[in-house]
Image (cartoon, rainbow, N blue to C red):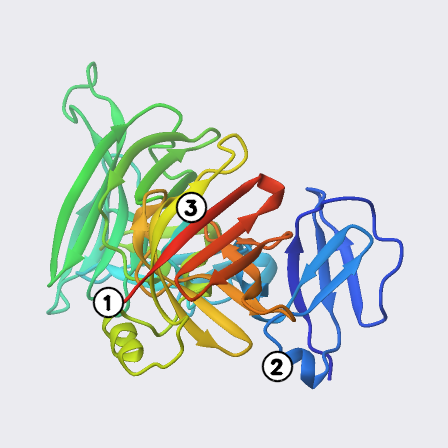
């Protein structure tokens, strides 16, 4: 049985002119080389690092493969895949419809779960029950018919059990419904949070330009990155209508359509694009308390806390991401370098216990090969090395960048 592992390499030289039988590769549109490891021996699986140099390429596998930048994941739902993952809804030609004749909002969630770290949700859809001056039927809790005008619809981001969710809600409105001269038809766009059975509107805007205010399609985009959620809306051209900060999404989300009483939502396509949190790739089980307890019982002179001491750095080539405090923990053929605190660049992403690097033993005493994770949590490996002097000074060397950083051993936290 073949084991396929994809990784992305930075090109540092000439083309590959020959490859071993157990490796395949291809070039992507950005000029990056992707390697596919087709077969692994048991020794390769157990090693933390497996280096192979082919011309001017360095191939890093096993332990550090997962640390390369996570690739976006895209889920595209349309008639081409039968809107896979939407359990509810009725197929009508090349679309899927969600008709709500109840007295409460209905959530039609796709069963694909995605990371809330960075995502984009796109829906091209329409409310077929959005004609002006019309009412649409629904039924109350007793089964009595009710008439609803301007029913709402939108996209929902569910935080786990449908009891807490965020949603972007659209509703057709008229500024002066009884004045034919001054009346304007608009779409009200609201960003709300539903929790404990109540809706709380966080922000809203009224849009009249380049949107279909009746029963035609609009494209709604919800894009989240760096703690900010941007909402874009339009028919042929989308405009950013609001940006929100502080939405407390759960780590994993599901997305779907929310239909309010009287609405009939027709969806042409629904797209979810997400990117994993890079910290998930390099999390460890270590906490500050576990590290302290481990070091109290350790007889390894290199294990312990290490505090930033000084640096000899070429500022034009490399910038230090913080005055780090680190911990060294014996791990296999070397030491895991655990982040404790001190990050200044991307400080909010770095938490105690995340892997900051790895020291791999060499044939030379106190000399190590180094893998270092930069402030963006990407692995740096090219010609990096480290040295521990008398278990008191740790020197990290970045020769390509003409830089070295020193840390001093601390007996206690």
Q: Secondary structure at mark 1?
A: loop
The extreme front residue here reads: 390
Q: CA distance from mark 1 to mark 2?
A: 33 Å
Q: Residue 230's image quarter? A: top left
Q: Residue at x 34, y 38 (%)?
A: 231
Circle 2 residue: 46
Label for residue 106? Answer: none
Residue 238 in view: yes
Circle 3 residue: 125
* The C terminus, quarter of image: bottom left
* The N terminus, quarter of image: bottom right
Q: Residues within 10 Å of mark 3 (few under 14, many from 20)?
A: many
Looking at the image, residue 411 lies above or below residue 47:
above
13 relative position to 174: left or right: right
Q: Secondary structure at mark 3?
A: strand
Q: Residue at x 23, y 32 (%)?
A: 205
Q: Residues within 10 Å of mark 1 (few under 14, many from 20)?
A: few
Q: CA distance from mark 3 to mark 2?
A: 50 Å
Q: Residue at x 23, y 35 (%)?
A: 133
The extreme top residue here reads: 181
Circle 1 residue: 412
Q: CA distance from mark 3 to mark 1?
A: 60 Å
Looking at the image, residue 390 lies above or below residue 41:
above
Is disc 3 in contact with disc 1, using a CB cutoff of under 8 Å? no
Q: Nearer the viewer, mark 3 or mark 2?
A: 2
Q: Residues within 10 Å of mark 2 (few under 14, many from 20)?
A: few
Q: Secondary structure at mark 2?
A: helix
Q: At which x and y percent is residue 245?
A: 24, 41
């Amino acid at each position: 049985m073949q084991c396929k592992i994809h990784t992305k390499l930075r090109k540092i030289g000439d083309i590959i002119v020959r490859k071993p039988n157990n490796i395949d590769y291809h070039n992507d549109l950005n000029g990056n080389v992707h390697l596919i490891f087709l077969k692994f021996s048991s020794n390769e699986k157990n090693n933390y690092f497996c280096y192979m140099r082919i011309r001017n390429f360095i191939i890093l596998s096993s332990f550090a493969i997962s640390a390369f930048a996570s690739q976006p994941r895209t889920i595209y739902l349309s008639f081409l895949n039968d809107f896979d993952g939407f359990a509810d809804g009725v197929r009508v030609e090349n679309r899927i419809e969600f008709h709500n004749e109840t007295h409460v909002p209905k959530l039609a969630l796709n069963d694909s779960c995605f990371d809330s770290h960075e995502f984009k949700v796109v829906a091209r859809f329409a409310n077929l029950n959005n004609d002006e001056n019309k009412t649409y039927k629904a039924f109350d809790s007793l089964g009595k018919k009710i008439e609803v005008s301007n029913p709402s619809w939108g996209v929902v981001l569910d935080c786990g059990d449908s009891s807490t969710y965020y949603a972007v809600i659209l509703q057709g409105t008229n500024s002066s419904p009884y004045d034919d001269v001054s009346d304007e038809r608009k779409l009200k766009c609201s960003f709300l949070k539903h929790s404990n059975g109540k809706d709380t509107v966080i922000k809203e805007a009224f849009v009249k330009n380049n949107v279909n205010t009746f029963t035609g399609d609009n494209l709604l985009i919800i894009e989240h990155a760096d703690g900010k959620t941007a909402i874009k809306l339009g028919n042929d051209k989308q405009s950013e209508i609001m940006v929100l900060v502080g939405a407390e999404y759960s780590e994993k989300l599901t997305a779907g359509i929310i239909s309010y009483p009287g609405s009939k939502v027709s969806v042409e396509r629904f797209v979810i694009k997400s990117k994993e949190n890079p910290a998930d790739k390099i999390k460890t089980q270590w906490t500050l308390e576990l590290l302290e307890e481990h070091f109290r019982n350790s007889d390894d002179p290199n294990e312990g806390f290490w505090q930033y001491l000084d640096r000899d750095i070429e500022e034009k080539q490399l910038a230090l991401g913080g005055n780090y405090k680190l911990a060294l923990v014996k791990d296999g053929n070397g030491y895991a370098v655990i982040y404790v605190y001190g990050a200044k660049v991307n400080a909010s992403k770095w938490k105690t216990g995340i892997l900051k690097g790895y020291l791999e033993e060499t044939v030379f005493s106190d000399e190590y090969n180094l893998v270092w994770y930069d402030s963006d949590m990407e692995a740096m490996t090219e010609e990096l090395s480290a040295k521990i002097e008398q278990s008191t000074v740790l020197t990290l060397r970045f020769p390509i960048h003409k830089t070295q950083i020193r840390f001093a051993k601390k007996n206690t936290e």
